[in-house]
Amino acid sequence: MTALAFSRLSKIAPDPWHVAHPGAGNIGYTCHMAAMHWAQMALGASQMRANEIVGVFTRLHCPGCKANGSGVHTSVSTTAYGHLFCRRAVLIPDRNSLHGMVEVGDVLIAGLAAWPMHTMVLRQKRGAGHITVRGFNNLGTLGTGERDRYDPVSHNITQDKYWKDPAAGLFGRGAAPLCVVRHADFMEASRMLRDEAMRTGAVAAH
């Protein structure tokens, strides 16, 4: 499994792209869940198995599921995702620093580690003027694609239109900080999630 393989998997729309919650039906994916899904596929999971593992994490932290189905059901907990997957995120201080701080297969988050607002996978890096990303529900941050859907286009985030204030490192329509989660760190968290799901019997060992 390589960073390039993970990057290439982000070109495949997650399927399924929703998680079943007892008593509430299906709840759609977020950008964070899509990245988790691709990481499980990079570890060898099928689309369905990747979805099962994402579902384990989502339901574990869902208020409705924790209340035996009687509470409010949500998509993945942002704080839980940040704690497991983004705890080693490194702030990119400005756009000029972007090229030297990221590599193909890294994960970029808009926001900070404790409260990641948006997740994207770094697809290509071809010099300081060509760094592209893929993601799910890019609309709110990049202004592209459809709300709550996979965006099948790679976007060159070195362009002015994706930054509110490049010198201050404020990224996207929400003018958020931009951070990088190293590929190795994201995959370490993904293996921990998979192994715990198997250990507890939440998903069957294959």
Image (spheres, rainbow, N blue to C red):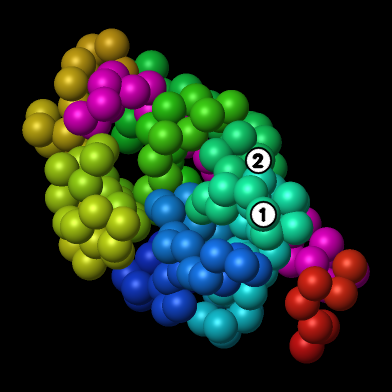
Q: At x 57% / y 48%, what residue is drawn?
A: 72
Residue 150 lies, with reference to residue 114, above or below; the image says: below
State the SS at label 2: helix
Highlighted range, magenta:
170-199
Single out the residue that lies furthest toward the bottom: 206
The one of 109 and 51 positioned closer to us in this rendering: 51
Residue at numbered disc 2: 80
The one of 183 and 202 positioned closer to us in this rendering: 202
Q: Is residue 135 rendered magenta in the image?
A: no
First-in-chain label (1 vs 2): 1
State the SS at label 1: loop
Quadrant placement of the N terminus: bottom right
Instruction: Tell me the amino acid under the disc marked 2.
Output: Ala
Residue at numbered disc 1: 70
The one of 96 and 163 positioned closer to us in this rendering: 163
Structural crowding at the residue carrying mark 1, measured as other residues with C-alpha within 10 Å and reported as few (<14), some (14–19) or many (≥20)? few
Q: At x 48% / y 34%, what residue is drawn?
A: 116
Q: Is residue 33 left or right of residue 134?
A: right
- Where residue 49 appears, x then y in whole percent? 62, 80
Residue 93 lies, with reference to residue 82, above or below; the image says: above
Q: Is residue 184 rendered magenta in the image?
A: yes
- Where residue 143 appears, x then y in whole percent? 15, 43
Residue 5 lies, with reference to residue 58, above or below; the image says: below
Residue 86 lies, with reference to residue 197, above or below; the image says: above
From where the camera sits, is residue 146 visible?
yes
